[in-house]
Image (cartoon, rainbow, N blue to C red):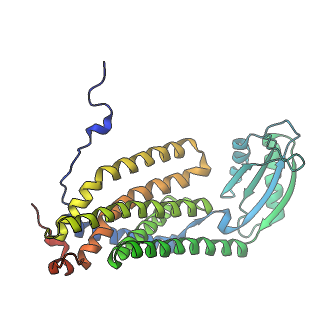
Amino acid sequence: MAMRGWPLIKLLPVKTNLHFVAFAKYAAGLSAVLVIASLIGVFYPGLNMGIDFRGGASMEVAKPAGQVIDLEELRGAVDELGLGDVQVQGIARLESDVNDGSTALLRFQIPEGQDQTQVVRQVEAAVSSAIGDVTYSGVAVVGSKVSGELFQSGLMALGLAVVLMFAYIWFRFEPQFGFGAVAGLLHDVILVFGLIVVMRLEFSLNMVAAILTVIGYSMNDTVVVFDRLRENLRKYKTMPLREVIDLSINETLSRTIITGFTAVMVLAALALLGGPTLFGFSIALMFGIVVGTYSSIYVGAPIILLWGVKRGGAADDARPVKLGMASRP
């Protein structure tokens, strides 16, 4: 016998009539507080830099061909030394170019003020004690200068992504849509940085990839809302702008919830089962999806309401309005 109400997606209302604009000024206040707090946190106490941006040492750990290295056991042995961020990755053997599990690349931080050679020897002793006799090769130390250049490159990649997104929205819509979209993107990126600071997540290249993904997701959600808003502005030429914004958000709400919830479920599984390497990436991306959905509703759209748009000669829609004056049907 078929279960009534299945699939559960049918339980979502087909049409909603929520008054989002009426709460825009309160959401703006909340966003301002969170953004300011996140910016302060980035400078103090600051980001918890990983090996990619702080520097450290790397070495290849190998067992005889046919013997498998337990990567988790290897990571745990180095973690016990309290060196900070530890990264372990299985790689192919140099002579055979085949990844048979017998070779791993180990990366770890070297605390400030400690002798590099001594730290490397401590790591080798801990690894040998945990997983048996192994050989070490390719020991290299990455200095803070190289890591600093990599950090600058990561920030430049984030900035370039925001600029390109702004150019795309400006080309496809009107300037105020572009400013609304960029404001939403900056809001999302800053809040993700705030989460990284609060949870003391390692800020590495994986985290840069997570933030770039958040930018893409946020822009995609914003474009969906803006596209429906543009259609409704042409369709309802005499409807007040605040009501058109509410209507457009309500019409795209079910799509937004379904897409976001699906992505969050996948990332939750990745955070639980993906190990420590992917935990920070998954958490940052889940949070970014949530704030990206929020910003499309309460950051991008209200800026359009404040700026106004020109449509069909309706002069009143081209004038800025107060967010607190949203009318209710």
Q: Position of residue 65 (x, y in %)?
A: 88, 39
Q: Is residue 255 above or below residue 210?
A: above
Q: Position of residue 60 (x, y in %)?
A: 82, 53
Does the image show residue 30? no
User: Which residue occupies the foreground of this view, 115 or 7?
Assistant: 7
Apparent side of residue 115 relative to residue 52 in the rendered image (left or right): right
User: Which residue occupies the foreground of this view, 306 or 123?
Assistant: 306
Residue 300 falls in image quadrant: bottom left
Apparent side of residue 278 relative to residue 320 in the rendered image (left or right): right
At x 87% / y 42%, what residue is drawn? 133
At x 23% / y 64%, what residue is drawn? 232
Quadrant including the N terminus: top left
Does the image show residue 91? yes
Query: Residue lying furthest left in this view?
Result: 329
- Looking at the rendered structure, the number of numbered marks drawn on it comes to 0
Apparent side of residue 95 relative to residue 302 in the rendered image (left or right): right
Quadrant including the C terminus: bottom left
User: Which residue occupies the foreground of this view, 128 or 218?
Assistant: 218
Q: Position of residue 275 (x, y in %)?
A: 60, 45
Q: Position of residue 19 (x, y in %)?
A: 18, 60
